[in-house]
Amino acid sequence: MSLSRDAAEAIALRCLARLAGNDDLLPVFLGATGAGGLDLRDRAQEPEFLGSVLDFVLMDDAWVMAFCTAEGLENTTPMAARAALPGGAAMHWT
């Protein structure tokens, strides 16, 4: 699945909204990224920040599945969205 950058940003914003509404997971995200509560609003339009939101959610299959189920998305969608944002290209080690 390949997504346009606009589609990827829209998915990441949906993910950020879900994350912001999750009282258990939001503090973990803020602690892991060093972001503050104001960053959620102030940086929500920055593709790099949206990439960090997807990076965080992609760390745990249960988080991916919960987000995708809630949003009616395929479980591969967050990874496809991440690949379309800055820094999301697959690494080639050879």
Image (spheres, grey):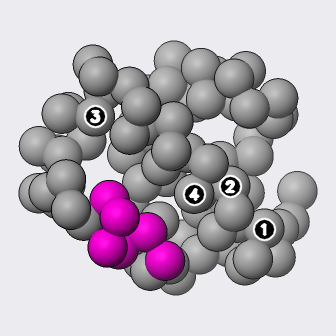
Q: Residues within 10 Å of mark 1 (few under 14, many from 20)?
A: some
The image quarter in which residue 82 lies? bottom right
- The residue that label 4 is drawn on is 13
The mark nearer the N terminus, 4 or 1, is: 1
Mark yes or no: residue 93 visible: no
Q: CA distance from mark 4 to mark 3?
A: 14 Å
| Foreground disc of the pair 4, 1 | 4
Cβ atoms at labels 4 and 3 below 8 Å apart: no
Q: CA distance from mark 2 to mark 4?
A: 5 Å
Secondary structure of the residue carrying numbered label 2: helix
The residue lying at 19 percent from left, 53 percent from top is 37
Q: Name the spot of residue 38 as percent of width and height, x first.
A: 21, 62
Give, as a three-letter code, the residue at label 1. Ala
Secondary structure of the residue carrying numbered label 1: helix
Q: Nearer the viewer, residue 91 or 8?
A: 8
Q: Which mark is residue 26?
A: 3
- The residue that label 2 is drawn on is 11
Depicted 34 relative to depicted 87: above or below? above
Q: Residues within 10 Å of mark 2 (few under 14, many from 20)?
A: many
